[in-house]
Image (tube, grey):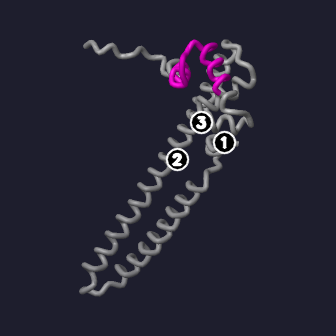
Amino acid sequence: MTRARDVARGRWPREAKALGGLILLLAITAIFFLIDSIVDLASESPGELPHNLAEFLAVILLTACVVLLSREVGRVLKRHAQVEVQLQAARGAFSEIMERHFEEWSLTPSERDVALLSIKGLPIADIASARNTRDGTVKAQLNAIYAKAGVSNRTQLVGVFIDEIIDAPLPTGEK
């Protein structure tokens, strides 16, 4: 199950739980100091009043910070969950785009594997190692992929997918 789905269902990741625990600890500390300040103010001696008021003000500020921090962490966690969902959608869309092109180009299963590893940026030697084949075989498969895709190198192959994702006209330099 993805982190985005977990967050959407109210199951927060470990980092979020840690932040929640720290905020809870700050809140407990603020409550302790608030009670201490109230007790000090109630049993004040005339010379202690400025000190007790300063402590009380510090506790109020600490409490306000805990509340504001809690709200901000909540907003950040919600935004994080939204970005996770968007990232999952983008991954799915990219996979669909690749599959559609691979089908249009009639790539063999081996060529699909090589194309995917190439798009991921693996060097030829690593692709050969991952596929348990020779560098020359991978080079031949890449040349076949480039020919079917109508491109001449890896950069142009990746560009086919990037262009479709961006789907925006290139700047002409004119103003």
User: Which residue occupies 39% across, 16% down?
Assistant: 170
User: Can you say whether 168 is above or below 122 in the image?
Assistant: above
User: Which residue occupies 64% across, 47% down?
Assistant: 10
Neighbours of disc 1 within 10 Å: few (<14), some (14-19), many (20+): few
Chief SS of the magenta region: helix
Q: Where residue 88 sits: x, y (%)?
A: 61, 34
Q: Where residue 5 sits: x, y (%)?
A: 65, 41
The residue to which callout 3 is attached is 122
The residue to which callout 2 is attached is 77
Residue stretch rendered in magenta on the structure: 139-160
Mark earlier in primary sequence (1, 2): 1
Check disc 3 and report its element: helix, strand or loop: loop
Q: Answer with the quarter of the image where residue 96 lies.
A: top right
User: Can you say whether 56 is above or below 71 in the image?
Assistant: below
For the residues labelled 3 and 1, the Cα–Cα distance comes to 26 Å
Residue 150: say if magenta: yes
User: Can you say whether 156 is above or below 127 in the image?
Assistant: above
